[in-house]
């Protein structure tokens, strides 16, 4: 399994909602065993775009889930020359399945909330048909929202998505740029 963590070397201007675009400083490549280079890391991105407060109507739908007061918007983009597949829940349409991450400011180590999904758990969910692989063709992107809790002012948040390059079973964990 390969984990890609998008670094934030410099902040470049602001986007709507006050979110900051982060420049990716990784110029390495993704390599799968026996298949050579499949895509440059900076060609595959999971980017935080904005966040908003959820409406009362949205929160009423999720009465049993407390604390999910924020909707965070992301874009998963594939600017490589290869097709990718990303893991999605059968019940959530095209929204990528993933884990919510958080870390203290100025820390490199992410923690999962409530816990990280391991590869064996993913395979079990796929075999039970709770999750499925969706294709993300070359030069395509998908934008989506996930509901999240409001972090503290002393932590950053992130989202982790699961990918694989078409024709290869190697699982790739892609972590978004951080947001507050």
Image (cartoon, rainbow, N blue to C red):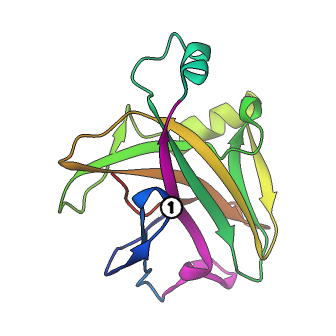
Position above or below: 23 against 75? below
Position above or below: 159 against 90? below
Instruction: Name the one closer to the observer, 48 or 106.
Output: 48
Give coordinates of residue 84: x percent, y percent: 74, 66
State the residue at coordinates (34%, 74%).
8
Instruction: Name the one closer to the observer, 51 or 34.
Output: 51
State the residue at coordinates (53%, 11%).
63
Give coordinates of residue 151: x percent, y percent: 30, 40
State the residue at coordinates (19%, 57%).
105
* Residue ID for mark 1: 16
Give coordinates of residue 15: x percent, y percent: 48, 67
Q: Is residue 32 left or right of residue 84?
A: left
**Residue lying farthest to the top in this orientation:** 64
- Which portion, as a residue range, is magenta? 28-54
Please, what secondary structure does the residue beneath circle 1 have? helix
- Magenta stretch encompasses residue 103: no
Give coordinates of residue 68: x percent, y percent: 45, 27
- Of helix, strand and loop, which mostly describes the magenta segment? strand
The answer to whether residue 93 of the structure is visible from this angle is: yes
Q: In this view, does 100 lie to the left or right of 145?
A: left
Position above or below: 122 against 9? above
- Magenta stretch encompasses residue 30: yes
The answer to whether residue 170 of the structure is visible from this angle is: no
């Amino acid at each position: 399994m390969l984990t890609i963590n998008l670094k934030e070397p410099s902040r470049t201007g602001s986007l709507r909602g006050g979110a900051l675009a982060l420049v990716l400083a990784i110029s390495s490549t993704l390599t799968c065993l026996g298949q050579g280079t499949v895509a440059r890391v900076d060609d595959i991105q999971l980017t935080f775009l904005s966040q908003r407060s959820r409406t009362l109507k949205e929160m009423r739908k999720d009465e049993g889930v407390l604390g999910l007061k924020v909707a965070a918007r992301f874009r998963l983009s594939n600017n490589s020359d290869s097709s990718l597949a990303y893991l999605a829940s059968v019940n959530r349409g095209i929204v990528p399945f993933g884990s919510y991450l958080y870390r203290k400011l100025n820390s490199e180590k992410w923690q999962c909330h409530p816990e990280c999904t391991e590869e064996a758990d993913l395979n079990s969910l796929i075999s039970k048909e709770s999750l499925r692989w969706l294709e993300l063709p070359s030069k395509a992107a998908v934008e989506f929202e996930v509901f999240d809790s409001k972090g503290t002012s002393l932590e950053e948040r992130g989202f982790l998505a699961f990918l694989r390059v078409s024709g290869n079973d190697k699982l790739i964990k892609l972590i978004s740029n951080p947001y507050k």
